[in-house]
């Protein structure tokens, strides 16, 4: 089914719906109790039960022949035995809470495990042991969950990084890693983090959003979706711009899904997040340096290597440095239709950032030469933003026309209408609207058998010699 048919089906659904959305590597070290814990009998019982559990299970906790379900069942059984030996009067709810907390500490990520299991939570932010924030439906809120102390936070961080062969200590106090499900993790500890260890987890969605989902959520309009589909099919090079957490990778995944099945796609990412359903996909992931500071493979290395892999399309998860030059050169030398994202606040800022990143490649190029490369390589810039109500929206789609003098010119094709304000619940009512300007690449799309149509992008009137009147 063509996208136009899917759009018509999806358009029937209201766009006003609210925005939806391992075995331990080392035995946790006992940390000294803090004052509040020492005064809390529940925490005292929890610590004694946990120590009794380790005494009973011993090396069986690390038995590689047991899968996670078997190990969880074993821990629960032994923990019930330990609690019975304590002979402490507990209600059924307290007993269940105690078993859950200790199981999460032993097999999972402690108080964070419940948030990782919650599909409505998209991000978890740990600001030391006493403060955990979570993001639900784009809104950040403080949770009631707490760590016992900073040592407890460090145990969880060390458990995460040990699974990917990394370490975090005073000599290496910052680390980027990912969980088994692909969720991205950033951790920073003292002395760099003054108020204790900090941890941020951006969860990996169980199922990738589709263009129909974005339409139902009001993230883009059917007309804009149709344009983006035709641009991908017509091998236009597209750059997605936006701030942190605005949905750039989600949109990149949607646009990548428009690539025809017969094309060979090479994806390049810092941490694998894209999930394409085409068969001919090669996924590449950068590698940080090892403990000795060796073996690093950068995004730029992978972009260069991808050019030798006979790709039809190159999809770069994010450009943030000198790889921008290699990506632009690829787009200008037969790899049109490539896709990528970068951090910027507007389409114009995206062009400026791209120039800056090209200079980071360490090659002394004149500014005009860089702008010529950018203007020739990039066809379309899609700007995404997170609104005050937490929703992610496409707020601008601009065509990159070319270089006039020393300035790269652009044509706004879609702009977000902010004039509708917000409703009584604080939800943004604005929508993405077409400007009525016809893109210059419309003729190239038509020659490829892809017609934009005249409803959104009117065809200019013909003059006497049979050509369009460009005014």
Image (cartoon, helix red, strand yellow):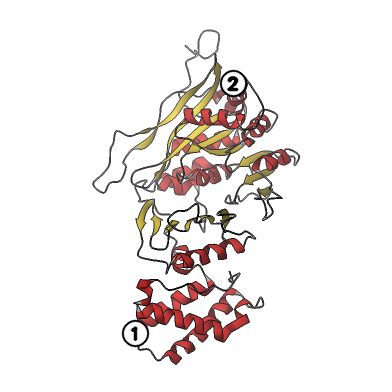
Query: Percent x, y for residue 28?
Result: 54, 72
Q: Secondary structure at mark 2?
A: helix
Q: Which residue is mark 1?
A: 91
Asked whether the viewer can see residue 329, the reply is yes
At 63% from the left and 81% from the top, the residue drawn is 59
Where 32 sits versus 409, above or below? below
Q: Which mark is residue 102?
A: none
Instruction: Farthest residue to the left: give it.
Output: 424
At 50% from the left and 85% from the top, the residue drawn is 52
Where 96 sits versus 456, above or below? below
Query: Percent x, y for residue 291?
Result: 67, 56
Mark 2 Cα shell of 10 Å, populated few (<14), some (14-19), many (≥20) = some
Asked whether the viewer can see residue 263, the reply is no
Where 158 sits versus 221, above or below? below
Q: Which mark is residue 367?
A: 2
Measure how far apart labels 2 and 1 are at the Cα level. 71 Å
Which of the two residues, 465 or 399, is positioned nearer the viewer here? 399
Mark 2–mark 1 contact, CB under 8 Å?
Answer: no
Q: Secondary structure at mark 1?
A: loop
Q: Earlier in the sequence, mark 2 or mark 1?
A: 1
Query: Percent x, y for residue 364?
Result: 65, 24
Number of on-image labels: 2
Query: Percent x, y for residue 466?
Result: 55, 12
Q: Quadrant of residue 180?
A: bottom right
Viewed as shown, does residue 16 lie left or right of 177?
A: left
Which of the two residues, 304 or 239, is positioned nearer the viewer here? 304
Name the front one of labels 2 and 1.
2
Viewed as shown, does residue 426 lie left or right of 271?
A: left
């Amino acid at each position: 089914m063509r996208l136009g048919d899917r759009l018509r089906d999806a358009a029937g659904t209201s766009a006003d719906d609210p925005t939806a959305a391992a075995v331990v590597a080392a035995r946790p070290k006992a940390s000294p109790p803090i004052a509040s814990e020492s005064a809390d009998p529940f925490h005292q019982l929890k610590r004694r039960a946990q120590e009794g559990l380790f005494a009973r299970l011993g090396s069986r906790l690390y038995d590689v022949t047991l899968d996670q379900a078997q190990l969880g069942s074993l821990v629960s059984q032994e923990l019930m035995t330990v609690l019975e030996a304590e002979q402490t009067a507990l209600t059924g709810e307290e007993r269940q809470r105690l078993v859950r907390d200790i199981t999460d500490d032993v097999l999972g990520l402690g108080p964070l495990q419940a948030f990782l299991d919650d599909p409505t939570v998209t991000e978890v932010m740990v600001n030391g042991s006493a403060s955990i924030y979570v993001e639900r439906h784009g809104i950040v809120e403080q949770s009631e969950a707490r760590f016992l102390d900073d040592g407890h936070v460090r145990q969880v961080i060390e458990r995460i990084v040990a699974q990917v062969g990394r370490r975090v200590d005073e000599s290496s106090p910052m680390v980027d890693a990912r969980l088994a499900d692909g969720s991205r993790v950033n951790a920073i500890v003292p002395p760099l983090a003054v108020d204790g260890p900090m941890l941020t987890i951006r969860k990996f969605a169980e199922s990738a959003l589709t263009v129909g989902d974005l339409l139902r959520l009001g993230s883009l309009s059917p007309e804009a979706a149709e344009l983006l589909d035709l641009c991908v099919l017509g091998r236009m090079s597209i750059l997605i711009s936006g701030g942190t957490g605005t949905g750039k990778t989600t949109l990149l995944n949607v646009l990548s899904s428009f690539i025809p099945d017969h094309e060979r796609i090479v994806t390049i990412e810092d941490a694998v997040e894209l999930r394409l359903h085409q068969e001919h996909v090669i996924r590449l992931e950068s590698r940080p340096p090892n403990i000795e500071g060796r073996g690093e493979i950068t995004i730029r290395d992978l972009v260069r290597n991808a050019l030798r892999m006979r790709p039809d399309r190159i999809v770069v998860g994010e450009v943030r440095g000198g790889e921008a030059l290699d990506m632009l050169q690829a787009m200008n030398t037969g790899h049109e239709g490539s896709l990528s994202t970068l951090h910027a606040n507007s389409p114009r800022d995206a062009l400026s950032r791209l120039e800056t990143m090209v200079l980071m490649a360490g090659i002394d190029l004149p500014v005009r030469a860089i702008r010529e490369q950018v203007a020739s390589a990039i066809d379309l810039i899609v700007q995404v933003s997170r609104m005050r109500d937490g929703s992610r929206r496409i707020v601008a789609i601009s065509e990159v026309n070319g270089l006039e003098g020393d300035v790269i010119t652009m044509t706004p094709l879609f702009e977000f209408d902010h004039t509708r304000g917000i409703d009584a619940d604080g939800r943004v009512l604005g929508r993405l609207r077409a400007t009525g300007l016809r893109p210059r690449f419309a003729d190239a799309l038509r020659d490829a058998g892809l017609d934009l149509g005249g409803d959104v992008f009117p065809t200019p009137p013909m003059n006497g010699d049979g050509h369009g009147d460009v005014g």
